[in-house]
C-alpha cells in the first residue's frame, strides 16, 4: 500500500514538473553551463527516476528557472503527447506497486512450500496431496486457494487457505476454517 502511494506521488510530481516547466518556458539555454540547465523533459525524468533529489532541486530552483525563462523562453513541440507518455509511464509504475498484482499463483512453488509448512505446524505428519488451485472468490488483495489434505486423523479432505501480501516482498499463507 505504501509503495503504491509513493509510486503515485513520484509519477504525479514528474508530470507536474514537466507541465510546470513547459508552461513557463523552462528549458536548456545554449552556452550556459550549470547543473540545473536542463530541458523540461530532463527535469521530469530526473523527478521520475531520482525523485528524492529531483523534486526538491526543481522546487528550490523553480523561481530562478522561471526568471531565466522570461529572458530565454523555450517552446516545446508536442507538449501534450509527451505529457501523456510521461503519465502512462507513471501509471505503469503505480501498477507495479498495486497490492495483489504481485501475489503468486496458488500452484506456485513458493505458495505450495508455505502451505505445506503451515499444515505441518498445525497437524504434524499431514501432507498436501495435490497442487493447490485458485478458488473463484479470489480478489486483488487476497488469493483464495484450495487443496486436498491427508492426515492420519481422518479421511482426506479439501481445505482452503488464503495468500496475501505481507510487507513489500513477502506473502502470508493462512488456512481458513
Image (tube, rainbow, N blue to C red):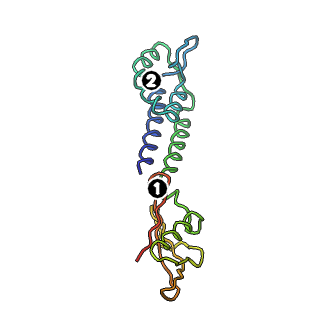
Of residues 124 and 23, which is closer to you in this image? 124
Disc 2 crowd rating (10 Å Cα; few below 14, some 14-19, many 20+) is some
Whole-angstrom CA distance, mark 2 to mark 1, is 37 Å
What residue does disc 2 label?
24
Residue 59 position in % (x across, y down)? 40, 26
Residue 66 vertical position relative to residue 103 in the rendered view, above or below? above
Q: Residue at x 46, y 32 (%)?
A: 19
Q: Quadrant of the C terminus?
A: bottom left
Disc 1 crowd rating (10 Å Cα; few below 14, some 14-19, many 20+) is many
Q: Residue at x 51, y 35 (%)?
A: 48
Residue 105 vertical position relative to residue 87 in the rendered view, above or below? below
Q: Residue at x 53, y 44 (%)?
A: 88
> Which dot, 2 or 1, sits closer to the camera?
1
Residue 133 position in % (x across, y down)? 56, 73
SS at circle 1 = loop
What residue does disc 1 label?
99
Of residues 43 and 116, which is closer to you in this image? 116
Amino acid at each position: 500500500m505504501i509503495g503504491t502511494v509513493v509510486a503515485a506521488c513520484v509519477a504525479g510530481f514528474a508530470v507536474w514538473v514537466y507541465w510546470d516547466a513547459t508552461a513557463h518556458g523552462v528549458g536548456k539555454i545554449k552556452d550556459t553551463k550549470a547543473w540545473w540547465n536542463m530541458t523540461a523533459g530532463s527535469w521530469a525524468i530526473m523527478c521520475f527516476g531520482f525523485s528524492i533529489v529531483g523534486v526538491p532541486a526543481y522546487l528550490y530552483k523553480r523561481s530562478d528557472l522561471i526568471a531565466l525563462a522570461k529572458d530565454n523562453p523555450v517552446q516545446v513541440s508536442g507538449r501534450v503527447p509527451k505529457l501523456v507518455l510521461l503519465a502512462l509511464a507513471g501509471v505503469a509504475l503505480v501498477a507495479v506497486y498495486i497490492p495483489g498484482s504481485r501475489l503468486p499463483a496458488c500452484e506456485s512453488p513458493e505458495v505450495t512450500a508455505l502451505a505445506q509448512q503451515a499444515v505441518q505446524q498445525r497437524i504434524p505428519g499431514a501432507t498436501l496431496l495435490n497442487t493447490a488451485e485458485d478458488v473463484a472468490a479470489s480478489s486483488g488483495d487476497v488469493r483464495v486457494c484450495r487443496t486436498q489434505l491427508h492426515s492420519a486423523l481422518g479421511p482426506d479432505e479439501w481445505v482452503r487457505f488464503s495468500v496475501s501480501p505481507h510487507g513489500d516482498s513477502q506473502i502470508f499463507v493462512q488456512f481458513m476454517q
